[in-house]
Image (spheres, rainbow, N blue to C red):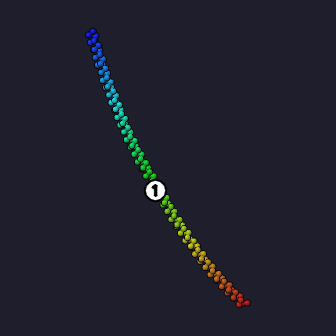
Amino acid sequence: EASRKAFETKVAANKKRDELRLKKEAAKNEAAKEAERAKAEEERKAQHARDEAVRRKEEERLQKETAEAENHAKAEKAKAEAHRKKIEDDLKKEEAKAEASRKAFEAKVAAGKKKEERRLKKEAVKVESAKKVEQAKAEEER
């Protein structure tokens, strides 16, 4: 009986020891899993931070390029506007020159007409007085 009890006690102690060993191992495995999870989470966060930094850098680069392109477009537009204005001003000057030239020509033509009219009047007066002289002669001869 004592031998059986001693054996049962020994078996119970072995069982308890095995249970404790298994619990310890399970706790160790759980701690390793948790450490692995924490490590994976840290790596995920670090990767996210790297991705975010790359995204921000790319966004800044795009904003800079966009601003440069907009400034270039504004400069080109201003240049084109200045060119258009210069062409308009040149055209206005040319039109004013042409108008002045036309007026000068018209004045010259008008002066020529007046001169011609005076000459014709003088000639008409001469012809008229020659007719009168002729008439007077004819009158006298009669």
Answer above or below: position of 72 versus 31: below
Horizontal side of residue 59 vs 24, given as left or right: right
Q: What crowding class fits label 1: few (fewer than 14 Cα within 10 Å), some (14-19), or many (20 or more)? A: few
User: Left or right of 81: which side holds 41?
Assistant: left
Residue drawn at x 30%, y 17% as measured from the top left: 15
Q: Quadrant of residue 56?
A: top left
Residue at the (48%, 57%) spot, across then down: 81
Residue hosting label 1? 78
Q: Where is residue 133 in the image (x, y as percent from the top left)?
A: 67, 87
Please tell me whether residue 72 is drawn above or below residue 140 in the rendered image: above
Q: Looking at this view, is 12 or 38 the one in front?
A: 12
Specify the farthest residue to the top.
1
Question: Which quarter of the figure is the N terminus placed in?
Answer: top left
Residue 43 image-quadrant placement: top left
Using residue 77 as the reference point, say whether residue 52 is left or right of it.
Answer: left
Residue 118: x percent and y percent?
61, 79
Q: Which residue lies furthest to the right in this view?
A: 142
Classify mark 1: helix, strand or loop: helix
Rendered location of residue 9, percent (x, y): 28, 14
Count of marks placed on residues: 1
Q: Which amino acid does label 1 sit on?
A: Ala
Of residue 90 and residue 36, the one placed in the foreground of this image is 36
In which image quadrant can residue 127 be found?
bottom right
